[in-house]
Amino acid sequence: MIHINIGSNLNSNFGSRIDNITIALNLLIEEKVKILKISNFYETPSYPNNNFPKFLNIGILANFENNYDHLFKTINFVEKKIGRTKSKKNYPRVIDIDIIDFKGLILDINNLKLPHPRSHLRNFVLYPIMEIDPKWSHPILKKNAQFLINKLSQKSRIEITRLKKNVNIEL
């Protein structure tokens, strides 16, 4: 299984943060990423600068017939198509798509690290995983999402909001 996280904290030419995420999902599907489950939307303050617009994120559980490198290139293609441009680290962006876990693979080459190196520290990654795949285990730490959520700071556990809204697409 593959875990991917999609986030947005800026409107784009396509519309709102929700529109950006929905379009990203549809483009991933067009590129042969088989979406199995999609979490609700989760909203969090921007990190580390809370003055930036809030982020919306979803987690997806997927399958992909090609390798991690092909998925990485596919994600870069989708981000560019939606209008992502390179900016300073942690600055607002119309779309941000991260591979969290690719079939349990542990890898560190060029600009790709698997599993995502900070996934176990991010509320907006762990809560969606807990929702859609509670039995998932971090490939290196060998801990499930609930255990990792319990290790987050109190602040990190209360500053996330699960919205009662799903992406409106057919799987």
Image (cartoon, rainbow, N blue to C red):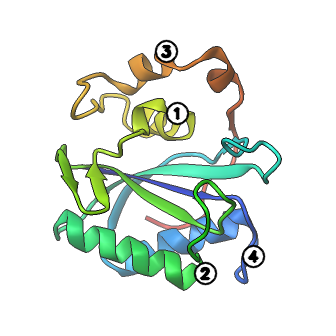
What amino acid type should be assigned to the residue bearing mark 3? Asn
Determine which residue is flagged by label 1: 127
Earlier sequence position, callout 3 versus callout 2:
2
Label 2 to label 1: alpha-carbon separation: 27 Å
Residue 141 in picture, x, y percent from top left: 26, 25
Label 1 to label 3: alpha-carbon separation: 11 Å
Say which mark, if any, is on residue 85: none
Q: Say which of 83 and 39 sits in front.
A: 83
Earlier sequence position, callout 2 versus callout 4:
4
Earlier sequence position, callout 1 versus callout 3:
1
Q: Secondary structure at mark 3?
A: helix
Q: Say which of 40 and 82 sits in front.
A: 82
2 vs 4, front mark:
2
Q: Quadrant of the C terminus?
A: bottom left
The relative height of residue 132 versus residue 21 in the rendered view (above or below) is above
What amino acid type should be assigned to the residue bearing mark 2? Gly
Q: Secondary structure at mark 1?
A: helix
Residue drawn where x is 59% and y is 68% of the image: 22
Determine which residue is flagged by label 3: 150
What amino acid type should be assigned to the residue bearing mark 1? Tyr
Determine which residue is flagged by label 4: 15
Determine which residue is flagged by label 2: 83
Left or right of 167? Residue 33 is: left
The residue lying furthest to the right in this view is 51
Label 3 to label 4: alpha-carbon separation: 35 Å
Label 2 to label 4: alpha-carbon separation: 11 Å
Q: Say which of 128 and 141 sits in front.
A: 141
